[in-house]
Image (cartoon, rainbow, N blue to C red):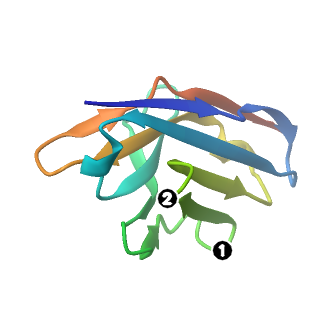
Amino acid sequence: QVQLVESGGGLVQAGGSLRLTCAASGDIFRITDMAWYRQAPGKQRELVAIITSGGSTNYAGSVKGRFTISRDHAKHTVDLQMNSLKPEDTAVYYCAADEIIRRSWGQGTQVTVSS
């Protein structure tokens, strides 16, 4: 059982930056991959970035070059540094943690980018 709590969301102007943090607790030794997803109004939840236990990363094409995912194994956290934000980045951002047989989700944090 893993619990995830996101923080760092808010309102920012286009071109600005935000840093999201996801803190994991519980059976953290079971976690393999960790990821950030987002869901905009009227759209399906989509993968933004993923990082494995070994540090390999993958990004959605829409955020590649602007966002960076990182992981601190000692603190049991994963961050998403978001630069050059665009209005189309507006969404609820969710942290996810993969175990062998299931995925745990955080409650989400709102990111709003104004023009």
- Disc on res. 7: none
Q: Which kind of residue does numbered mark 1 sit on?
A: Gly
- In the foreground, 21 or 1: 1
- Disc on res. 65: 1
**Of marks 2 and 1, which one's residue comes earlier in the chain?**
1
Above/below status of 56 relative to 95:
below
Image location (x, y in percent) of residue 6: 57, 32
- In the foreground, 31 or 11: 31
Give the Cα separation between the discs numbered 2 and 1: 24 Å
Above/below status of 17 relative to 59:
above
Residue found at x 58% / y 71%: 64
Position of 81 with respect to 47 (left or right) is right
Image location (x, y in percent) of residue 2: 32, 33
- Determine the secondary structure under disc 2: loop
Image location (x, y in percent) of residue 40: 52, 33
Above/below status of 56 relative to 18:
below
Image location (x, y in percent) of residue 58: 43, 71
Q: Judge whether residue 115 can be spotted in this image.
A: no
- Tag 2 residue: 73
Residue found at x 73% / y 48%: 19
Residue found at x 80% / y 60%: 84
- Determine the secondary structure under disc 1: loop
Q: Which kind of residue does numbered mark 2 sit on?
A: His
Residue found at x 55% / y 40%: 22
